[in-house]
Image (cartoon, rainbow, N blue to C red):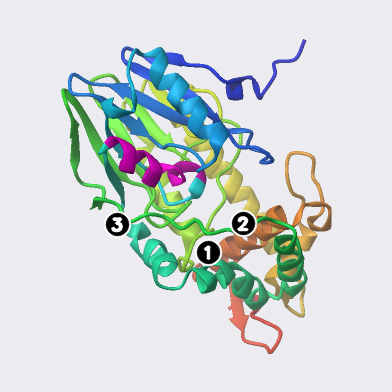
Amino acid sequence: MAEDRYSWAEPGLEEVADGVFRCPLPLPGDALRAVNSYIVKTDSGLLLVDCGWDRPECRRTLLEGIGLLGASLGDVLGIFATHVHRDHLGQAAWLRDRSGAWLTLGLGERATQMAFASDPSRARLASVERLRRCSAGDVADLLIEQAKHLPEDSWGPPRPDLYLCGQELLLAGSVELEVIATPGHTRGHLCLFDRGRGLLFAGDHVLPQITPSLGVELPGEDSPLSSFLSSLAAVRELPAGLVLPAHGPTFPNLRERVDELLAHHRRRLEGCLEVVRADGSTVREVAAALPWTRRGRLLKELDPFNQMLAVFETEAHLRVLADEGRLRTEAHPGGLRYFRGS
């Protein structure tokens, strides 16, 4: 029987290293199925690495996991969020208010956090506006229509107690963790490295089964793919015996997986270049010409949210090709067009 690639998402508590526990939190309606929250026991309390959506299912599962360790919410010492996305940060404010725990976030996420704090309505429309600049107004319209049928969304990323830039040593009781800046998935994405135990808390930077989305943040980074490739190189040589990702099972071969991700993006760059037409192509046109997911689906076959991810990822690859001089750009009323040659 083939191995169930989603078995890692089943609820429960898995001790992945001495005093380190993986607690999958459900993501209802999301193809990712779950997000891993890691609970680290220290002599002063518990450290949480990512904490899930602000939803009853996530809250209940996390509290049950903490309870299985003979602890309670009051034992949570701190919350380290690898990045600003709500499946990693969603219930951080609720947890902080009830536990007194501190909350950290990457300094690069400050612009996103402030955008939501100052004008949440405009922040939620930023992705729609960006899709239109990519000549993907049809995808923008689909997202707007979909939003009409969803409950009103008032969530915004909370302000952390401390922003980290990625050169710190995080001390949680007796545990020492190196903070590593890994921009790309978001501009402020951070990883944690426990050098003594060879553990890399990888967030969404290095995932075992999928490639992380790029540039889904506010405001958008100039070249998220360039940042991501550099960040992969930065962690490749770490002496990590075990990688603890946010989605998927833990795995041992960091260097091998990094090389697979680098190769994937090299192939994707060549694929983008190949489908750019002689008379120029928009981001949306290139995205529509590429296969998506492991099943090779067309853009129009994806749901609106994943169409948005596909357009933004295509934009990230085209920017790299333009920066390398392999494509040139021209501004047109319908959006930026990419042409072969300098």
Residue furthest out toward the front? 98
91 w.r.t. 57: above or below? below
Are the residues flagged by discs 1 and 2 in contact, CB closer than 8 Å? yes
Residue 44's spot in the image, x, y percent? 18, 23
**Quick one: label 1 or label 2, which is nearer the N terminus?**
2
Quarter of the picture holding the N terminus = top right
Residue at the disc numbered 1: 320
Q: Which residue is mark 3?
A: 107
Q: Secondary structure at mark 1?
A: helix
Q: Is residue 308 above or below residue 33?
A: below
Q: Residue shown at 47%/16% (left/top)?
A: 13
- Of circles 1 and 3, the one toward us is 3
Residue placed at 74% from the left, 39% from the top? Answer: 294
Inter-mark Cα distance, 2 to 3? 29 Å
Seen from the viewer's position, the closer of residues 41 and 240 is 41
Tell me the magenta residue range. Answer: 87-99
On-image quarter of the C terminus: bottom right
Kind of residue at disc 3: Leu
Q: Quadrant of residue 334?
A: bottom right
Quickly name the residue at label 2: 269
Is label 2 in a helix, a strand or a loop?
helix
Q: Magenta stretch: dominant SS?
A: helix
- Tell me the amino acid under the disc marked 1: Val
Please report whichever mark, 1 or 3, sits nearer to the chain's N-terminal start.
Answer: 3
In terms of sequence position, does the residue under pointer 2 or pointer 3 come before the other?
A: 3
Q: Is residue 97 magenta?
A: yes
Query: How many residues crowd around disc 3 within 10 Å: few (fewer than 14), some, or many (20 or more)?
Result: some
- What's the residue type where badge 2 is placed? Leu
- Mark 1: few/some/many CA within 10 Å (<14, 14-19, 20+): some
Marker disc for residue 281: none
**Is the residue 251 above or below the residue 226 in the image?**
above
